[in-house]
Image (cartoon, rainbow, N blue to C red):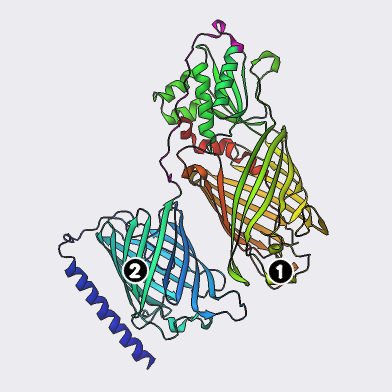
Amino acid sequence: MADDFRSDLFKSAVKMYAILLLVLASSLSPVKLIPVQPTYALDRPFNNAANWGGTGLIETPNARILEDGVIRFGAAQASPYRWYTGAMGILPRLEFSGRITQITNIPVPSMPGYGTLKDKAFDIKFQIIPESRELPAVAIGIHDFHGTRLFAAEYLAISRQYYPIDFTLGIGSKRLKGPMELPVLDRYGLFGGVEIELNDRLHFIAEYNPIEYEIDKSSARGVPEGARYPVNVGLRARILSGIDLGLSYQRGNTFGIMLHIRAGLGQQILPYRADPPPLVSVDRRPFNKRDQKEMVEKIHEAIHEAGFSGVAVYTDGRDLIAEFENSRYLSNQKAAGRVLRILLFYSPSDTVRLTAVLKKLDMPILKISVMPDQMEKYILGEISEDIFFERLLNIEITDHVLETRDGEYIQSKKDRTSRYNIGIKPDIDIYWNDPSGFFKGTVSIKPYIRTDLWKGASAYARFSIPLYSNVYSPSAASLPPDVIRTDISKYMGKYYTFDRLLINQAFRISKKTFGRLSLGYFDNMYAGVGGEILFYPGDGKMAFGAEGDWLKKRVPETHFELMDFKRYSILANAYYYYQDLDMTFHAQYGRFLGGDIGWMLDISRRYDTGAIVGIYYSFTDTDVFTEIWNRGYHHKGVYLSLPLRMFLTRDSSQMLNYGISPWTRDVAATVSHWQDLFSLAKDITPAKFRAKLVEIKE
């Protein structure tokens, strides 16, 4: 009987599918569908979101993917399902998506404040073959590959574009298998559909949906009666650039709606207004015709007024040298280019070399040198970028500013090392999926002060002033104090306190080896002392080091009181920078705060705007934990850093940081560091600096 039902269902689906295509074709007769020739274009305009957030039709995937660096957020509903989604083209031809699926008709009685069932899931899709004249686009993907796997599936999809129609045929397993089983491979079934661009704002979608809702896992069986018809149809409209609204009719009895917003992380949100060129009187008289002291003071003033700090200028009657810290631009290449141009404008005609020295915490890190005439010809376009970058521009790690003794140079005044930076940071923290309630959050303001004390030393204080918080976890109230992070809700959002109060001392051990000592209150849970060492071999593509922290846990609801509860971590670090994709790989091995030993892997990528996306995942021995929620667990999360300049018409070095991760586990726990050594120098090593050399000309 079940076989007869499936046969009838299949016949009904085929008939309905054929009728829809005929009706659509006749209604579009005025549109130029003839001749039917493939365009072999990009995946656009057919790389839009399905219900679950990944690129697809309505409930099924296609072989299209988001472009590299494009991020998409959205929400959708087709009762009883509700989806909150995010997706991104994380690499060329690779898409990652995540979602929270809420099933509104399945309550969770064991967690009264939690509401109905909500499930986290992650998906990944790789486009094996991009569409070409000879071949269609082909992609493979995995749905819900980690965790409870309530909605797990694997598939291979083929899409072919005959503009304005995009056809998709797929082979799926598990939830995408459906009743149309393949004759030999009975673990797999067929799915497919079409998407038609009616005009540049409106798309029509029709698909055969293979999902048999009635055989979903019982804990997530939101449609126990199954779909009335296995065909979904819908319209997708582009409301504004990057904003899509979709309406659909699904399962033969359900209306659906979806809204998605997309943006490119490699694109400026607002039009960028370039900085005006410096207004200086070019004076090319030779050194012996100039007042050299007056000259270096004028150069110092020009660099300082350009927004840089820690400035000093030197000359020995042959070269011009400027040291500075980039507190003005997100791009260090742009900063160095600005300083070199200022030196060029003031340089005597017999200047041999211009040198800009980038510093951090008053420590020289990177030296960039070039001959004045070569710099001028490059600016005027008379020398190609390849020749200038590869042969004429010298870039090296340095531990000094001057080549010879200070007494042999005429120098300008030097900006005081000590400076204060005072501000107020608005802070919104959002937490998902705690048993006491799905959506938790805090709103606070955090006044802060940061000062550079002396060479390599800086201090930072931040005070948290809560405005609103509903963060409360009843499970945390009964926890013993010797848990690492599980009781974090006791420390969050309701009490005035210093969440950071510390001093850092960075120092040079050798030309390419750095050290750090830290002392104070590192975050809202731990205080203590920490140390780190880091070595950059070669040109800085790699770095190796070790760090350790010895900590005491803070008493909740107090400013400075500490428990008699001690923890320590000892970790080895290895970094590798892959220039072609501007990616950084970080591997960490050792003993974490909870006593678990193992690995933490972190991969991040930087885009042209300066935006950074990263993901991390741990593999540690969790047998040291007695709590069931820590046993066998892998700490993981994603993070996003957006440069403030993406939303401004001017440049800024400020970053906006966001992250999503579980917040009540003790696995692979570390203390947060305000300044670590890799962050100190990673952007001004020769390898990283050379990756974006074109920005010197901006």
Residue nearest the viewer, comparing 49 with 68: 49
Disc on the earlier residue, 2 or 1: 2
Measuring from the top left, give residue 554's x and y in whole percent. 77, 57
Residue lying furthest left = 30
Whether residue 317 appears in this view of the structure is no
Residue 156 sits above or below residue 353 on the image = below
Give the image quarter of residue 43: bottom left
Q: Are marks 2 and 1 in contact (CB under 8 Å)?
A: no
Label 2 and label 1: CA atoms lie apart by 42 Å
Residue lying furthest front = 467
The residue that disc 2 covers is 247
Side (left or right) of 696 relative to 197: right
Residue drawn at the location 50% of the way across and 73% of the way down: 102
The residue that disc 1 covers is 476
Residue drawn at the location 61% of the way across and 43% of the way down: 542
Magenta residues, start to end: 266-293
Please state which amino acid type lies under the numbered disc 1: Ala
Please state which amino acid type lies under the numbered disc 2: Leu
Residue nearest the viewer, comparing 36 with 530: 530
Residue 564 in the magenta stretch? The answer is no
Side (left or right) of 19 relative to 169: left
- Answer few, some or many: residues within 10 Å of disc 1's Cα (few below 14, many 20 plus, some between 14 and 19): some
Measuring from the top left, give residue 343's x and y in whole percent. 53, 20
